[in-house]
Amino acid sequence: MPEKSPDVIPMISYEDGVAALEWLANAFGFVEKRRLLEPDGQLSHAEMETGNGIIMLGTPTPEYESPKHHKRNCEAARKWSKVPWVIDGVLVYVDNIDMHFANAKKAGASILTGLEDGYPGRRYRVEDIEGHRWMFMQRAATQ
């Protein structure tokens, strides 16, 4: 972790935390900093960095359902997930949004919205391999 931790650190659960670590690194360019595994190989805790931000992730219990699987099993979740917005998710600022978008798309991310211009910066919305929603944004030159 950086010298001073950010004031807010998202903590995200994944059905397959190990696969998520590798996918988030490949698709979004996050850098793995810590990985703690259970004796059975399941991820108990991990930390990844991007810029000056940190996310934590883990695999809580066998009963946990990712957003992707929850949508399959719940009519209400299917309905609220039809919108392309980040319902529950994380906003991440990146330096080169066009390159980031191309890399996420190449890695198989589910693109919710293409690249958009506007205040407060160029952005896109995406779901990761387990259906967690992210917005990536490049700050406008005046910020």
Image: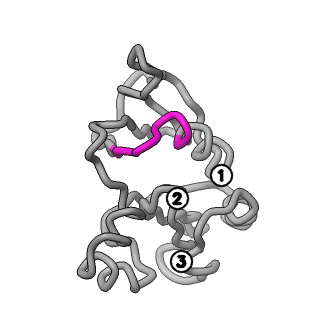
Is disc 1 surrounded by few (<14), some (14 to 19) or many (20+) residues within 10 Å? many
Residue position marked by numbered label 1 in the rendering: 27
* Mark 1 to mark 3 CA distance (whole Å): 15 Å
> What is the three-letter code of the residue carrying label 3?
Leu
| Residue labelled with disc 3 | 112
Which residue is drawn at the image coordinates 41% and 40% (left, top)?
55
The quarter in which the N terminus is drawn is top left
Q: In this view, does 99 lie to the left or right of 5?
A: right
Q: What element carries label 2?
A: loop
Question: Residue 102: x and y, percent?
Answer: 75, 65
**93 lies left or right of 28:** left
Where 8 falls versus 121 (above or below)?
A: above
Query: Dot 2 corresponds to which residue?
Result: 128
Give the residue at x 61% y 67%: 141
Label 3 crowding class (10 Å Cα cut-off): few <14, some 14-19, many 20+? Answer: some
Three-letter code, disc 1: Ala
**Marks 2/3: CA distance?**
10 Å
**What whole-number distance in Å separates the C-alpha atoms at marks 1 and 2?**
9 Å
| Residue extent of the magenta highlight | 12-20
Dot 2 surroundings within 10 Å: few (below 14), some, or many (20 or more)? many
Residue placed farthest to the top in the image? 39
Any magenta on residue 17?
Answer: yes
Residue type highlighted by circle 2: Asp
**In the figure, 94 relative to 12: above or below?**
below
* Residue located at (62% from left, 51% from top): 28
Question: Is label 1 in a helix, a strand or a loop?
Answer: helix
